[in-house]
Every structure is written in structure tokens, then in C-alpha cells.
Amino acid sequence: MANLSLDNLLQEYAVTGLLTRTILIVDDELPNLAVLGSFLEGDYTVIEAGSGDEALTIAQSTPIDVVVCDQRMPGMTGVELLHNLREAGIDAPGIILTGYTDTPALIAAINDAHVFRFLRKPWQPDDILTAVAAASDSVTYQRAARRLLDLLSARTTELQNAVVELRAAQQSLLHLDRLVTTGRLAAGITHDLRNAMSSLVMVEYEVTAKLSDPELVETIEVGLAGLRNLLESLETMNQYAKQKRLAMNMEYFEPSQVVRDALTVMRMDLNFRARQVQVDAPRETLPLLLGDRQKLVQVLVNLLRNAAQATRVDDRIWVCAAVTASGFVRFTVADEGPGISPEVRDRLFEAFASTKEAQGVGMGLYMSKLIVESHRGALCCLEREGGGARFEITLPPAELGA
């Protein structure tokens, strides 16, 4: 019944080629090799060796099923040969022919070499045939078990990978559903905000034309700049939710413009105005960029707003733009707040992974990363030396193309 079950398994999993039906016989006396070979050749392919060294060489280059060897051979005994074969990773069971009478010593040697069976001289042909058949069955089971275990291990790995892929697909569907919902919400807010902006633009025009108070005019202009940035951010989110990509309004611009525009928007943020902001974005030393300036302003505004929310009154925030050793432009926003833990940092740029709990949707840094990568750049978060967080945006210069 067990054989039937094993045969069914081997057939089901197409496991074949377990036996070569090749027997290696080893003896230093040629007449003994001739006798052994004469009654084994009818059922098996027989390979002869006159010494242990020769047998070891043959076994390392030729697939064999069973080894039949004499115990007493010059140079290497039969047990030593089988021990060396096992050390070489050859799984063929060994049958030892011996006239040795010190049974305890022989059994100890057999245990060391894992000899399948030993036959005392003088042996009978039927004894040899029976022992070889049993050894062939034994190696068949061993090889079948290893092959099936390998298949099981592979199937287990495939199943584990399938589960991982299934979970990823499930998360992707959930992510897509939430993204679509967020996009619809953004579309509704964008529609209402655009209508409100139309009225406010008219107010801006009237105030600019009729009032001479520069502070009031500036306040209105800064406020509208913030609303325009918010409108652009919502439209970017809605666009990505619909098309799964970002449309880019490509133009040449100076990196210092991005910093200046972002700071203009942030001037309406009372938290930001209560911080000590240090700016370093020299216009003269920075190469031109090619990309969507307004979208990059959105990214910088998001980083500056996060820095303002992570710090306290009179804490410092740094924003700068510089050239890297490889000629790229690097924007940096750093603060001396509490910093970001490694656990949070690992998922910081994932969609809906907000660090602000109920106060955030978790789309700001996700969209920022999409925008930067759409410019063939990189956005990363680092631990600032001395405490706080440090975000870096690295972009290729216009001469390399965006």
C-alpha cells in the first residue's frame, strides 16, 4: 500500500529517472570481478573497478545506484571506500563482501560508513541479487523523498510568494479605491475653490487698481498665491487619481524661483511666520532646471508646512538650494523639531500614511514624491545632525533633460 502511494505521488508530480540501474563492483582480484559481473549483467549495467581509488574516481563522474565491494583491498578497504563516497555526496548504498571474523569492529566500521549490508564469504549469487535489489529499493525511496521534498519546498515558496502577491494586489485595490475617492473629493473642492477664486481675483484687481496701501495689496496677493497653490495641489491629486500619471507643464526656470514662490505662499501661514527661517538659494551659482515649476513649488510648500507643524515658536527652519558634486540641484528643507522615527520614516512616502494622525490625509509626501520622480529626481528623508528632520530633493539640471 505504501509503495502504491509513493508510486502515485511520483506519477502525479512526474518524478522520473530515480534509478540508473548501474552497479559499481569493486575488488582487487579480477576473477572475483568476473564472477560478480556475470550474474549481475543480466539485470543491471555493471562497471568494474580494481581498487578503492579507481572506484572513487568512477563514482564521482558516473551516476550509480549501488556499490558492491570487497572489504579487504590494498590501499583502501571497502568500508573506507563507502565512507569516502558518502563524504563526496554520493548516495549509492554499499554492500560489503567480507570474510572478516571480528564482528564488533566490523559493525563499528559499518556504522561509520553507513553500509547498507554486508555478506560473509563464501556468498551465494541469490544473496547478492537480493541484497542489490533491496539496496536499489532503498536508494529509490531516498531519492524519491528528496525529490518530493524539493518539490514541496518549491511549491511552498511559490505559495508564499502567491500569498504575498495576493496581499499586495489587495492593498493595491484598496489603495486605488481610496485614491479614486480622494480624487473625487479633490475634484469637488477644486470646483468650488475655482469659483471662489474668480471672485477673489476680481477683488485683487479692484484693490490693486484703486488702493495705494502697499501692505494691504501685498496681503491680498500673498493670500491669493496661497489659494492658487492649494488649487494646483488639488488639481494635481485629481489628475493623478484619474490618469495614474502627472501632466507636466515644462519650462525653464531658476531654482531660486521655486524657493521664492514657496516662501511667498508660506507667508500666510502664521506657524511658519513664527519660526526663524534661514534661506540660502543663490541665483548666480545654480543651473537652470527644466520641469513644472508650479508642481515643484507645491512640493517645497508641503515640506515647509510640515517643518512648521513639527517645530515650536522661534525654532529654526532651513531652506536652501545648492549644486551637488555631480552637477545636480539639491533643495533642502530642515528643521530642529523632534525628528522622525525610523519606523515612520520607512513608510513616510506611502499613500495615506500620515504622521499627523487625524489631522492629515497622508497624501502630501506621497504626491510630492510622485512629482519629484516625474522630474527624474529623488526625494528622501534623513535624520538631521543635531536633531530634527531633513528632506532633500535632488533634480537633474536642464542640460540633462527632465
Image (cartoon, grey):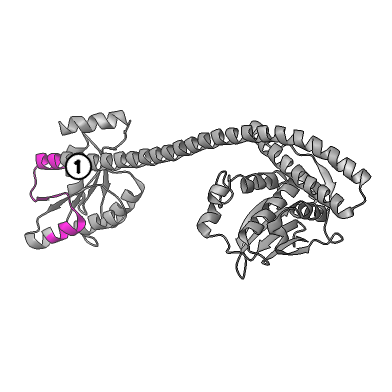
- 371 falls in the magenta region: no
Kind of residue at disc 1: Ser
Work out whether residue 351 or residue 248 is closer to the camera in this orientation and state it. 351
Q: Secondary structure at mark 1?
A: helix
Counting from the top left corner in percent of width and height, residue 219 is at 81, 51
Q: Is residue 168 above or below residue 382?
A: above
**What are the residue bounds of the magenta stretch?**
108-131
- 110 falls in the magenta region: yes
Q: Is residue 34 above or below residue 327?
A: above
Counting from the top left corner in percent of width and height, residue 204 is at 85, 43
| Residue occupying the point 26% across, 31% down | 9
| Residue occupying the point 76% across, 56% down | 329
**Residue 322 in sight here:** yes
67 relative to 380 in the view: left or right: left
Residue 7: quadrant of the picture:
top left
211 relative to 298 in the view: left or right: right
So how many labels did they put on this image? 1
